[in-house]
Image: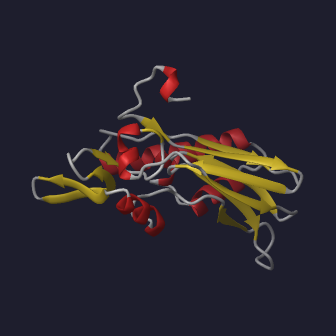
Amino acid sequence: LIRNSGIDCRESGSCAVTCSRHGDILTVANVGDSRCVMAREVEGGGAGRLSAVDLSIDHKPRRNDEMARIQRMNGVVEPARGMHGFVGPPRVWKRFPRTGGLAVSRAFGDTNLTTAGVIAEPEIRTERIGPRDKFVILASDGVWDHVSSQEAVDIAAAHQDNPRRASEIIAAKASEGWKRAMNGGYRDDITAVVVPLNY
């Protein structure tokens, strides 16, 4: 589909996470480092205390199974090389010529790195939900770089009556984190959606 679109996706791409519900079954699919988190009431933990349950696992190159595939495909996982050594997170590179530098191991697009092991195949998980499961949060990596899964659940829990406001506050917290970390010079994509489960 991407190749037939006419869009040059050799060195650009995207990540995605989806969550669908059919009765009491959630199905989550992700490619890259966007994440789905569910809020679950803690058993015996006091009234209304919620715990974060990650329903997806980020596709980072340093993940053992992802790194193994990349290395089998003759790709390289290492941070970028700077003037004084390595800098930043581990990235996927082609071995020769040394090109790439993608910080995720799965993506839609970035087709120049398919020969280095970057794939677009989603990881799929199902989860049976019950009355203790209150809401899900779907967010891009720009959120998760500065807000933990539990912090996001805590923010959303304080605004369960207004999921839109909860989403805005999570995004604002991530934005503040980027401002502090990068002195306002850069921030990654920030998208957050809070969806009540209404079990």
Q: Where is residue 179 in the image (x, y as percent from the top left)?
A: 37, 44
Q: Nearer the viewer, residue 78 or 163?
A: 78
Count of numbered labels shown in the rendering: 0
Q: Closest to the observer: 132 or 55?
A: 55
Q: In this view, does 149 lie to the left or right of 22?
A: left
Would you identify the image quadrant in which residue 45 lies? Answer: bottom right
Identify the residue shown where x is 19% and y is 59%.
86
Q: Is residue 99 visible?
A: yes
Residue 149 location, quadrant: bottom right
Q: In this view, does 148 lie to the left or right of 29?
A: left
Q: Which of 143 and 85 is in front in this view?
A: 85
Of the pair 9 and 51, the residue shown nearer to us: 9
Q: Quadrant of the N terminus?
A: top right
Q: Where is residue 183 in the image (x, y as percent from the top left)?
A: 29, 44
The answer to whether residue 127 is above or below residue 28 is below
- Say left or right for 88 vs 31: left
Q: Residue sitting at 53 percent across and 60 percent down?
A: 148
Q: Residue at x 43, y 53 (%)?
A: 105
Q: Point out the image quarter for the C terminus.
A: bottom right
- Which color scheme is applied? secondary structure
